[in-house]
């Protein structure tokens, strides 16, 4: 049913920390690795070793340069996957009921055997979170690793999305946003977690933590100058042969 | 947005076909016998042909029947229902005219309403999308409906009414373009809101996720031919409305009428190509493109 639930019991989602993400793309690879061989159709590649490779990914890492009014430009790595919106426009446009938002945990999923591959849900998503698989002709999207998080065959430590499990810099966190005491809710509260494109009215569940203010390396700071006196040049004036050579060459 | 030929042909020809069915159903043009058969057959070829061509862009056309299930929320599903209702009702109405020389007015009226509702639902598939600011307006519906009515009037030989509808459709087309040119800038969505980084400074796309292209870029960031957009707009408007009006004002001949129809269809096809090619999806912002 593509009508959205008025409320979900849980709001499972991700917090993505733009301050600590180092842009290593490990989440992209682990996501593709897990999701191409588990739930649903594989994530196909077209011409993977040829001149024009492309493929289906559920998670992609962009990099942006931000230039403040004063000071140095900052480089910010920006992982982007489905935000599991509360008002998910991709769900309501679906003509077949293949797209749905789960009442129990708020995860937005595609029932691939009902998907006609019309692509309208990808059109309706402002974030580019849905991609049509070119080999299968069905819409693929982040499942929040629904086949991991409830999977009792996995050790408990692995029962979180592959991207979160693999992130070496702890830039991705998984949890329930409906619970104000959960770690993700607390992170959002402490760090001022934000929505992407709030004006689109999608009410995304996933939140992004803005980068912390940078150190001001250009300011005169005593701490930085501690070693400076020891690093001053010792030989200020050349003597002997080198001095003669220097002067002679200058005269030429 | 990628201008898929199947969708351009679908929306143009089914719009024309349902426009003609509208005039037939409202009883503004009441042929009987063989003449009725020819007109209804023509309308059905346009409308059904358009619908069939629209299935070519589906990943799984064999599951198309499932698209009837979500009419409560989905404009695409509503379009499917309206189209079937229109085609069934107008088939009954047409059978009355062709085989029994009977005009079943109520069925015709309902069929005509369903025909125009089909065009409206088609327009709402695009008009509902907040992600494409150029489309996200009732101008889109006015544009589709006015073209459908003008084309239908042209095919149903409505005389002066055709002239009026042609001029109205041309004016709405022009207004739609002009409003659309500023839509993205006024939508409030930009790289600052897309990344949430606008409070730090000016955001610029530094490096895309992959060196190659992907589905999102192919589908939503289509920039080919945009530099010719203004010329194409003039060509589209002249073919769609100006030339047909001139041809209809000349002393009547069937050849001139045929030329007017061909010109109108060519103009609408060009305008529909521009409708897609000029539409910019907000996801392009993440790639620093539009």
Image: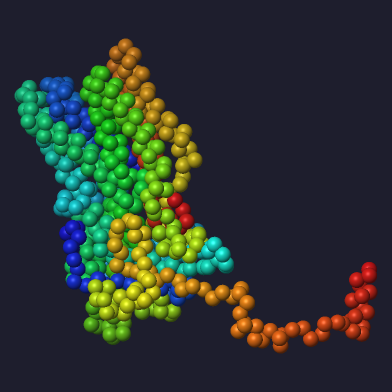
What is the quadrant of the N terminus of chain A in the image? Answer: bottom left
Q: Residue furthest top?
A: B251
Answer with the quarter of the image where residue A71 lies: bottom right
Residue at 34% from the left image edge and 14% from the top image edge: B250
State the residue in front, B194 or A81.
B194
Answer with the quarter of the image where residue B158 lies: top left
Residue at 30% from the left image edge and 28% from the top image edge: B168
Q: Position of residue B150 (x, y in %)?
A: 27, 28
From this view, report whether residue B216 is shown above or below residue A208.
above
Q: Position of residue A230 (x, y in %)?
A: 71, 88
Q: Position of residue A243 (x, y in %)?
A: 90, 80
* Residue A222 falls left or right of residue B199: right
Q: Position of residue B72 (x, y in %)?
A: 16, 52
Q: Is residue A37 visible?
A: no
Q: How many marks?
A: 0
Q: Is residue B88 visible?
A: yes
From this view, report whether residue A250 is shown above or below residue B59.
below
Question: How is the protein colored in the picture?
Answer: rainbow
Residue at 7% from the left image edge and 22% from the top image edge: B101
From this view, report whether residue B204 is shown above or below residue A214.
above
State the residue in front, B179 or B124.
B179
Residue at 10% from the left image edge and 25% from the top image edge: B98
What is the quadrant of the C terminus of chain A in the image? Answer: bottom right
From this view, report whether residue B124 is shown above or below residue B153.
below
């Amino acid at each position: 049913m593509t009508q959205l639930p008025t409320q979900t019991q849980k709001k499972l989602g991700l917090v993505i920390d733009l301050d600590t993400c180092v842009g290593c793309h490990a989440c992209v690879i682990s996501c593709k690795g897990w999701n191409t061989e588990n739930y649903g159709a594989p994530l196909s590649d077209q011409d993977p070793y040829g001149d024009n490779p492309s493929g289906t990914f559920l998670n992609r890492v962009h990099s942006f340069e931000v230039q403040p009014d004063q000071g140095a430009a900052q480089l910010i790595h920006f992982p982007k996957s489905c935000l599991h919106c509360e008002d998910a426009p991709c769900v309501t446009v679906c003509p077949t009921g293949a797209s749905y938002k789960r009442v129990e945990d708020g995860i937005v999923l595609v029932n691939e055997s009902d998907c006609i591959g019309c692509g309208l849900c990808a059109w309706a998503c402002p974030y580019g979170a849905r991609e049509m698989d070119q080999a299968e002709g069905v819409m693929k999207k982040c499942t929040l690793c629904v086949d991991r998080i409830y999977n009792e065959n996995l050790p408990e430590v692995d029962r979180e999305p592959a991207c979160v499990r693999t992130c070496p810099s702890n830039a991705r966190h998984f949890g329930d946003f409906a619970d104000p005491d959960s770690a993700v809710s607390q992170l959002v509260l402490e760090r001022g977690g934000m929505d992407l494109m709030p004006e689109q009215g999608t009410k995304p569940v996933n939140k992004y933590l803005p980068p912390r203010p940078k150190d001001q390396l250009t300011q005169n700071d005593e701490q930085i100058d501690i070693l400076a006196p020891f690093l001053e040049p010792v030989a200020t004036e050349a003597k002997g042969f080198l001095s003669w050579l220097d002067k002679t060459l200058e005269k030429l | 947005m990628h201008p898929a030929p199947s969708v351009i042909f679908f929306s143009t020809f089914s719009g024309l076909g349902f426009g003609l069915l509208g005039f037939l159903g409202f009883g503004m043009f009441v042929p009987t016998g063989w003449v009725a058969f020819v007109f209804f057959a023509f309308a059905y070829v346009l409308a059904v042909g358009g619908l069939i061509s629209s299935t070519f862009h589906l990943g799984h056309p064999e599951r198309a029947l499932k698209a009837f299930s979500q009419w409560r929320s989905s404009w695409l599903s509503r379009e499917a229902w309206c189209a079937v209702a229109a085609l069934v009702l107008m088939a009954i109405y047409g059978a009355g005219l062709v085989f029994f020389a009977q005009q079943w007015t109520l069925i015709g009226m309902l069929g005509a309403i369903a025909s125009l509702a089909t065009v409206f639902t088609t327009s709402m598939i695009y008009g509902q999308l907040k992600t494409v600011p150029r489309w996200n307006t009732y101008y889109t519906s006015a544009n589709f409906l006015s073209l459908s009515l003008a084309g239908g009037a042209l095919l149903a030989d409505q005389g002066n009414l055709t002239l009026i509808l042609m001029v109205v459709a041309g004016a709405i087309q022009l207004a739609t373009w002009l409003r659309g040119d500023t839509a993205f800038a006024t939508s409030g969505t930009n790289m600052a809101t897309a990344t949430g980084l606008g409070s730090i400074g000016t955001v610029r796309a530094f490096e895309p996720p992959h060196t190659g292209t992907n589905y999102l870029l192919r589908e939503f960031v289509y920039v080919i031919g945009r530099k010719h957009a203004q010329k194409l707009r003039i060509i589209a408007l002249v073919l769609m409305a100006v030339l047909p009006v001139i041809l209809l004002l000349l002393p009547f001949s069937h050849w001139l009428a045929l030329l007017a129809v061909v010109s109108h269809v060519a103009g609408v096809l060009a305008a529909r190509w521009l409708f897609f090619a000029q539409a910019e999806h907000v996801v392009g912002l993440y790639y620093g493109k539009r």
